[in-house]
């Protein structure tokens, strides 16, 4: 050590600023315990930091558009029933799914039913509404939908397979994968329910319209039957007054009618009826009146009634409870891939080793420089 100091002092006396690498290496080798001690201390501090902070994990799930039209069965039923149901293809169905999974309402509903319950169980005090809103905002921000530069979801513009990547970050390693998978299924169910609800609404509207048209046809027929009964009753009264009990042809009317001039004058209005039904005679008219009174709706062919009744029978048998379909396909579920993303333990430990070594070397040279300054000051005093 004294030899190294003499070498350095000799360089200083000559006015040269030179560094002897061998002397530097010797200094570090002599103080290696100090360097290693400081490095170990820094690494230990980094390790304690890693133990004290919560690890943040990330899960991913890949969703793709269905290859076939899952709603084809509903489209066919709508065509058969002539429903006002917009035809939905697989791409439109997938876009409906994306709209639901990115909606704030659905995320809030899922957060309240799943995530908030876990947070409440871990918290010692009941959360305030403000704290709940802050936690929901944090959860919604950590639920990421991978988008392109234009801000649109990665759905095939040409109608091909759309691919969307969803990511969720959180400290709950065993739960975030289940949460993301359940949320995707919740959005899928919401989409399916929306489509079925639209179909059922159009089905109910069509059934209501058919019932209205059937009722209208029946009321119209009832009105026509009442009109026919009134006409036959009037003809019967005329035929009874003039004594027509049997059918009378118009050619023999003058020969068959033997009424006084007064009677003809009194019955002139009845004889001017536009319908010659009174010529059928009272017996025929009574039979027709009896038939019309006992007539049922099924016994006649009303205009459009049979067609509407058949269509109503077909629509009434449609049951959407047995129709099952999905709005998307899960290509990779979240539970199968849970990745720790923060903090990066390996990176932090490697950086702490270099920082510890740097701090140790810096400390050694700092102490060595201070010792040299003190030595020179002592020599000057002597």
Image: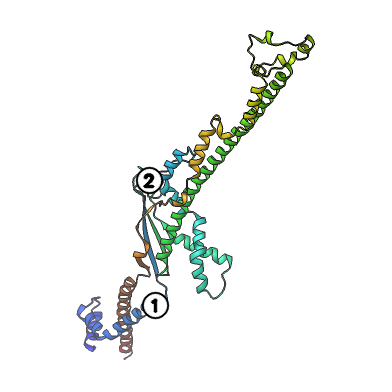
In the image, residue 369 above or below residue 156:
below
In the image, residue 54 above or below residue 262:
below
Could you tell me residue 353's position as x and y percent?
30, 76
Tell me which residue sits at (77%, 11%) in the image.
265
Tell me which residue sits at (44%, 51%) in the image.
322
Tell me which residue sits at (74%, 18%) in the image.
241
Q: Earlier in the sequence, mark 1 or mark 2?
A: 1
Q: Residues within 10 Å of mark 2 (few under 14, many from 20)?
A: some
In the image, residue 149 above or below residue 19:
above
Q: Which residue extends farthest bottom?
A: 382
**Location of mark 1 (residue):** 51
Work out how far the residue at label 1 is from the one at label 2, CA to CA, in angstroms.
Answer: 51 Å
Q: Residues within 10 Å of mark 1 (few under 14, many from 20)?
A: few
Residue 360 appears left or right of 56: left
Could you tell me residue 362's position as x and y percent?
32, 78
Q: Nearer the viewer, residue 127 or 42?
A: 127
Dot 1 falls on a residue whose secondary structure is helix
**Location of mark 2 (residue):** 69
Q: Nearer the viewer, residue 182 or 361?
A: 182
């Amino acid at each position: 050590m004294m030899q190294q100091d003499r070498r350095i002092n000799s360089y200083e006396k000559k006015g040269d600023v030179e560094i002897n690498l061998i002397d530097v290496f010797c200094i570090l080798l002599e103080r290696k315990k100090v360097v290693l001690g400081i490095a170990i201390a820094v690494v230990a501090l980094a390790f304690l930091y890693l133990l004290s902070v919560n690890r943040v994990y990330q899960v991913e799930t890949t969703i793709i558009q269905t290859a076939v039209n899952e709603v084809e069965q509903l489209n066919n039923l709508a065509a058969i029933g002539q429903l006002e149901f917009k035809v939905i293809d697989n791409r439109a169905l997938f876009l409906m799914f994306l709209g639901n999974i990115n909606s704030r309402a659905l995320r809030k509903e899922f957060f309240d039913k799943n995530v908030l319950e876990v947070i409440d169980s871990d918290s010692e005090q009941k959360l305030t509404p403000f704290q709940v809103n802050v936690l929901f905002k944090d959860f919604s921000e950590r639920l990421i939908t991978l988008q392109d530069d234009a801000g649109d979801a990665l759905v095939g513009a040409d109608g091909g397979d759309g691919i969307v990547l969803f990511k969720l970050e959180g400290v709950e390693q065993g739960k975030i994968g289940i949460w993301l998978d359940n949320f995707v299924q919740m959005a899928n169910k919401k989409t399916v329910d929306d489509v079925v609800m639209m179909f059922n609404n159009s089905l109910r509207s069509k059934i209501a319209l058919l019932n209205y048209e059937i009722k209208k046809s029946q009321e119209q027929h009832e009105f026509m039957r009442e009109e026919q009964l009134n006409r036959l009753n009037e003809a019967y009264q005329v035929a009874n007054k003039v004594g027509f009990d049997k059918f009378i042809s118009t050619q023999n009317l003058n020969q068959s009618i033997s009424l006084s001039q007064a009677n003809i004058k009194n019955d002139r209005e009845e004889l001017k009826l536009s319908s010659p039904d009174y010529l059928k005679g009272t017996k025929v008219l009574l039979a027709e009146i009896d038939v019309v009174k006992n007539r049922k709706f099924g016994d006649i062919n009303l205009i459009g009634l049979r067609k509407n009744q058949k269509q109503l029978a077909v629509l009434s048998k449609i049951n959407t409870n047995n129709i099952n379909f999905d709005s998307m396909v899960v290509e990779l579920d979240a539970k199968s891939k849970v990745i720790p993303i923060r903090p990066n333990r390996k990176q932090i430990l490697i950086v702490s080793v270099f920082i510890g070594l740097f701090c140790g070397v810096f400390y050694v040279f700092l102490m060595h420089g201070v010792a040299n300054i003190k030595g020179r000051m002592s020599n000057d005093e002597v």
